[in-house]
Structure formats: C-alpha cells, structure tokens
Image (spheres, rainbow, N blue to C red):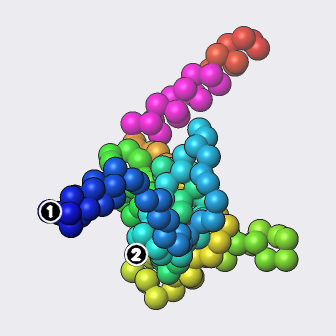
Amino acid sequence: MKYFILGLSTLLFFQTQTLCVKAQEFGRIGTYTITNTSYHAFARPGEATIQVLVLGSVNAGIYEVGVGTDLGELLALTGTAIPERTKGEKRTLTIRLYREVDGIRNLIYEAPIQQMLNEPKNYPDLQEQDIFMVETIVREKKDWYQIVRTGISIISLGLLIDRLIR
C-alpha cells in the first residue's frame, strides 16, 4: 500500500508539472515580426530557407522558400497564371530574375513564360535576396473597324481645318 501511494503521488506530481523542452530550430534565426508586407513561407519544418523578393503582376511580397526551390516552383507559389488570349488583345508574360553581384543588381535570367516552361534545365538556382519579377504586357490588336474609324477622324479633321482656313 505504501508503494501504491508513493507511485500515485509521483504520477500526480508529474502530471501537474509542465516541462519546458525546446528542440533545435532550423530556418531563420530569431523571431518574426508581422508587418503589412506580404510575407509567404513555403518550407518544410527543419528545412534551410532563403528569402526571395517577388514583384510584378503576381501575388507580390517576400517569399521564404526551401533551398533548392527552382523558378518553376516559385512561379507556381506566386499564383501566376498563363495569360489567356482574348479577342482584341495580346498578353505577353515575361519572367526576370535579378541578383546582387558586388553591390550591383544584375539581370541573370529573362524569358517569356512559354520559353521558361519549355526549358526547365536553364533555370538558375535561387539564392538569398534574389528579386523575381513577373511582367505582363497587354497590347490591343488593331482591327479594321478601329483603323477605318481613325482614318475617318483624320480626314474629318483635315476637312475642318481646310474649311476654317478658306
């Protein structure tokens, strides 16, 4: 009976005590401060990470990704969609990667999205503090109606000037 009470009291003692144990942390050292900047973390627990600044016509912000993440994976994480062709406009999506070398930001990779997706072996490895930019250029196609309308406007303006001069 004496051992039962001792065991029960020991069990109750350990259940009421909290033990603070902290494992070794990987990734960024220190604490995180939340700001209004868009910050995205995509890494497995314990995986070494890098930070890449993403700009342009995507979900821009600072992306913390695992070492070894390539451009295609980062493009997918940003939520970039291949532009659809719509009537009357042409969209071009260009991918650029800038890296600081000797204190100067240099363009180290540039390609239209179709070329980038077709040539995954040409992706440079991402490094800490790279800048990844996605630029979308929208060009309106000129159709015959717009060309005729512009021509008629120019002719009308010429006739008006001629009438005012006489």
Task: Tell me where residue 143 sits by quadrant.
Answer: top left
Residue 153 shown in magenta: yes
Q: Which residue is mark 2?
A: 117
Residue 160, percent from left and from top: 64, 16
Residue 138, percent from left and from top: 49, 49
Q: Which residue is mark 1?
A: 1
Note whether 70 is above or below 51 in the view shown: below
Answer whether residue 96 is visible to the viewer in this image.
no
Task: Tell me where residue 166 sits by quadrant.
Answer: top right
User: Of residues 75 and 127, which is closer to you in this image?
Assistant: 127
Q: Is residue 131 left or right of residue 74?
A: right
Majority SS type along the magenta span: helix
**Tally of numbered discs:** 2
Answer whether residue 32 is visible to the viewer in this image.
yes
Q: Secondary structure at mark 2?
A: helix
Residue 27 shown in magenta: no
Note whether 51 is above or below 58 in the view shown: below
User: Of residues 24 and 101, which is closer to you in this image?
Assistant: 24
Amino acid, disc 1: Met
In the image, the segment drawn in magenta is 145-158
Q: Residue at x 62, y 46 (%)?
A: 33
| The N terminus sits in image quarter | bottom left
Q: Secondary structure at mark 1?
A: loop
* Residue situated furthest right in the rendering: 103
